[in-house]
Amino acid sequence: MATAKCCGTAPGVGHRHNPGHSVSLAVFSHDACLAHDTGPGHAECADRLRAVRSALRARFPDLDWREAPAASRGQLLRVHDAHLLHAVLETRPSHTIWLDPDTVLSPASAEAALRAAGAVVAAVDAVMSARTRRAFCAVRPPGHHATHGAAMGFCLFNSIAVGAAHALERHGLTRVAVVDFDVHHGNGTQGIFEQEGRVLFASTHQMPLYPDTGHVHERGCGNIFNVPLPPGAGSAAFREAWRTRLLPQVEAFRPQLLMISAGFDAHARDPLAQIELEAEDFAWVTAELAAIAQRHADGRIVSSLEGGYDLQGLAESCVAHVGALRAA
């Protein structure tokens, strides 16, 4: 995945938590996620999270902000091997080091990755206990490229996979749907669950593009559904792919919990890809997914931030996504 300069800056926001208060949407985040230092010019920069948090607070001043806990080793080991945990948690670099041509480990990265994964776990617990119907995790680093044994593509731990595995093992669910509209295919999530029939994975993504996975013929154990889109596909092709090919599969699965890898790098402003979507497209697909969750999962949705590398496009898209989660 080629890096690109992170565009612009945005101020950070604080957190507000109402203990014991049942709400329609909670946002999980942590300031530790800002301290993951990818270095100058890297696309996956802390200003991304600042932009998201600032935009959400400005648009939705009544949001219930909750502090993300750190994921436990046991939670991480459900989807990752001990070698990856050791590499991320025990290396303890005194300066920024590169794990691959795209992926950085800095002195504060381990804590950021633990909080990102922990946010999704806490969000699952919150929706399953009816403390909230829906949750959005405003965290970084992203996660969906991280495989069972390797950090890659800006990702250290696969937060959405950690959360889905927690839903299966801690809450006893038998049908968890993970949908991914990031412009890059979620190879890590697919690989982790491709032989796990209790999880459905559905994705649109640009092809050709990093990581060069996500072909239609990749079906796992019948639980994987990929619709690659060409550069310049645009809104009509994106919506058609979801309406005719992916949403029917999610509907037929009757998920007890719906989880979203919410990447916004398919936005027309994004420097890393060319699907050319607008914020309204993310609102549309979110509303369609929320309707399925309402029919089969008592409305339960956990969404976690993945990509999106133009700050204006990212902020607008997150506001549209969270607005649709709140409205449905």
Image (cartoon, rainbow, N blue to C red):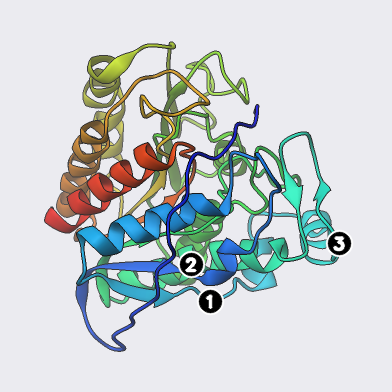
How far across and how far down the image is residue 278, in percent? 27, 29
Measuring 68% from the left and 56% from the top, which residue is drawn there? 37
Q: Is residue 286 left or right of residue 68?
A: left
Label 3: few (<14), some (14–19) or many (≥20) C-alpha neighbours in 10 Å: some
What residue sits right under mark 3 in the picture? 93
What residue sits right under mark 1 in the picture? 69
Q: Upstream in the sequence, badge 2 or badge 1?
A: 1
Measuring 24% from the left and 30% from the top, which residue is drawn there? 248
Q: Upstream in the sequence, badge 1 or badge 3?
A: 1
Residue furthest bottom as drawn: 19
Label 1 – label 3 distance at C-alpha: 23 Å
Amino acid tagged 1: Pro
Amino acid tagged 3: Pro
**Residue 301, can we see it?**
no
In what element is the residue under mark 2?
helix
Q: Upstream in the sequence, badge 2 or badge 3?
A: 3
Residue furthest left as drawn: 327
Label 2 – label 3 distance at C-alpha: 24 Å
Which numbered circle lies on residue 272? Answer: none
Which numbered circle lies on residue 119? Answer: 2
In what element is the residue under mark 3?
loop
